[in-house]
Image (spheres, rainbow, N blue to C red):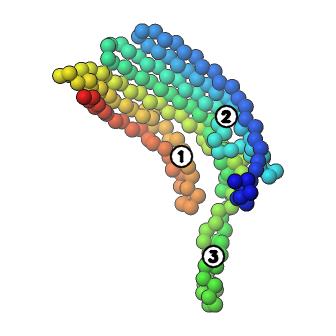
């Protein structure tokens, strides 16, 4: 609703380009996709990059099918860092929840984060390598699939977010192996 006082009308511009390469044969498939993009928002005179603005993004995928039913996949992804607002300081914010005389004099305040210019900095780049193998087969009339997945093979420490309250970096998924068995009836 445009009449909602919490709704702020802004304008924005986005532009970019994407390139895709693809090769297909009976033995393997190769894919590569690269995008270069920009997004800027002007909201009430404040110009900034929104949190989803990613300048570079690259995906490379190779699928090898050496035997009937066997498929192995190698996928590598790279993305430049997303924008974020840096923490420039903290202050104690007085909270007057209980205005009864004598109570608020003892108030020490709660930590309050002071932020720098909106989304003026960039998080570190993101990249990871995933490898998987799957084998499809039929046993006693049932279709089955057994697979192994290795996520983030070289265990890169990709940032998920920075917890401003604890001043701790929280990373995404580290190296994660998994196995699956699927039976269809």
Residue underneath mark 2: 55
Q: Where is mark 1, residue-wise?
A: 160
Q: Is residue 126 above or below residue 165?
A: above
- Residue 94, by quadrant, is bottom right
177 lies left or right of 21: left
- SS state under label 1: strand
Q: Looking at the picture, how far across and down is residue 170, in whole percent?
A: 51, 50
Instruction: Look at the numbered discs 1 and 3 and tell me whether their residues touch, using CB distance below 8 Å.
Output: no
Seen at 69% across and 53% down, the residue is 1
Query: SS class of the residue under badge 2?
Result: loop
**Pointer 3 residue:** 95
Residue at 65% x, 45% y: name it.
51
Quarter of the image containing the C terminus?
Answer: top left
| Residue at image point 75% right, 41% down | 12
Mark toward the start of the polypeptide (2 vs 3): 2
Is residue 121 in view?
Answer: no
Residue 151, horizontal then vertical, whole percent: 42, 34
User: Which residue is farthest bottom?
Assistant: 101
Cα–Cα gap, marks 1 and 3: 31 Å
The one nearer the camera, 8 or 51, is 8
Does the image show residue 17? yes
Instruction: Give coordinates of residue 136: x percent, y percent.
Output: 30, 21
Dot 3: what SS? loop
Q: Is 68 on the left or on the right of 160, as rendered?
A: left
- Label 2 crowding class (10 Å Cα cut-off): few <14, some 14-19, many 20+? some
Q: CA distance from mark 1 to mark 2?
A: 18 Å
Q: Nearer the viewer, mark 1 or mark 3?
A: 3
Q: Position of residue 172 (x, y in %)?
A: 49, 44
**In the rendered image, which quarter is residue 56 located in?**
top right
Cα–Cα span, label 2 and label 3: 41 Å
Q: Earlier in the sequence, mark 1 or mark 2?
A: 2
């Amino acid at each position: 609703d445009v009449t909602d006082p919490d709704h702020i009308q802004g304008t924005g511009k986005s532009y970019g380009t994407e390139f895709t390469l693809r090769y297909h044969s009976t033995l393997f498939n190769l894919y590569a996709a690269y995008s270069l993009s920009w997004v800027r928002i002007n909201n009430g005179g404040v110009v900034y990059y929104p949190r989803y603005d990613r300048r570079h993004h690259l995906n490379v995928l190779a699928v090898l099918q050496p035997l009937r039913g066997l498929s192995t996949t190698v996928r590598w992804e790279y993305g430049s860092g997303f924008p974020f607002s840096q923490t420039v300081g903290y202050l104690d914010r007085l909270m007057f929840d209980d205005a009864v005389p004598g109570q608020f004099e003892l108030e020490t305040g709660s930590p309050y984060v002071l932020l720098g210019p909106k989304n003026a900095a960039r998080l570190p780049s993101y990249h990871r390598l995933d490898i998987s193998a799957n084998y499809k087969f039929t046993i006693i009339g049932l279709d089955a699939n057994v697979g192994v997945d290795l996520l983030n093979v070289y265990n890169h420490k990709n940032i998920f977010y920075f917890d401003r309250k604890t001043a701790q970096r929280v990373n995404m998924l580290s190296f994660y192996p998994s196995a699956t068995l699927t039976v269809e009836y």
